[in-house]
Image (cartoon, helix red, strand yellow):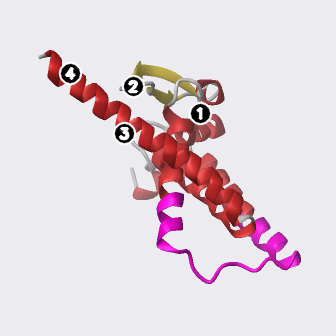
Amino acid sequence: MTDGERRYDDEEETPLAGYATLATTFAAGVGLFAVVARRRGLRLPDGVPPWDMALLGTATFKASRLLTKDKVTSFLRAPFTRRERDSEGNEVMDVSRGSGMRRAVGDLVSCPFCTSAWVAGALVGTYASAPRAARLVCAGLTAVTMADWLQYAWSLTEQKAEG
């Protein structure tokens, strides 16, 4: 078998066309935002202060986890994934199912690292066009992240006290 005849992934069929479609969709969304922003005369910030970066980063982390791992958002992932197992807290482990575009979307919506680029794009777009609203949304997601950390700390304290 020549190198040109080998598949990209020897174990499973990797949905490269689906990934390309998703990447193109993301790039088109960024391009559309740029065109609309320019036509509306939106003045983009020269920089992002460290505090806003911390809010954007924490909010991106939490929104990505909520979308890809939370039980309550399973209905969004269900057409593209199946439940593999429950995990810590209220999180679940889903795996993609199907083939082609369905599998590519399943890979995206079950991976917090993959989804974070899309979430960051949406939050940064909101930050550029409506910074006060973006900060408020990011502050809310950051508050949820901090509450999660406190819940885990409390659980560890209770476990230590019990034994």
Q: Is residue 75 above or below residue 117?
A: above
- Provide the residue designation for mark 1: 99
Q: Is residue 133 left or right of residue 57?
A: right
Q: Is residue 132 above or below residue 17?
A: below
Q: Disc 3 and disc 2: Cα gap in Å? A: 11 Å
Pointers 2 and 4 in contact (CB under 8 A)? Answer: no
The amino acid on which the numbered mark 1 sits, given as a three-letter code, is Ser
Circle 3: is it few (<14), some (14-19), or many (20+) Cα within 10 Å?
Answer: few
Residue 111 in percent (x, y) is at: 48, 41
Q: Quadrant of residue 11?
A: top left
Earlier-in-chain disc, 2 versus 1: 2
Q: Which quadrant, please, contains the C terminus? A: top left
Q: Which residue is mark 4?
A: 159
Q: Which residues are magenta?
A: 30-56
Q: Residues within 10 Å of mark 1 (few under 14, many from 20)?
A: some
Residue linked to disc 2: 89
Residue type at the position of mark 4: Gln
10 to 132, vertically: above or below: above
Q: Is residue 44 magenta?
A: yes
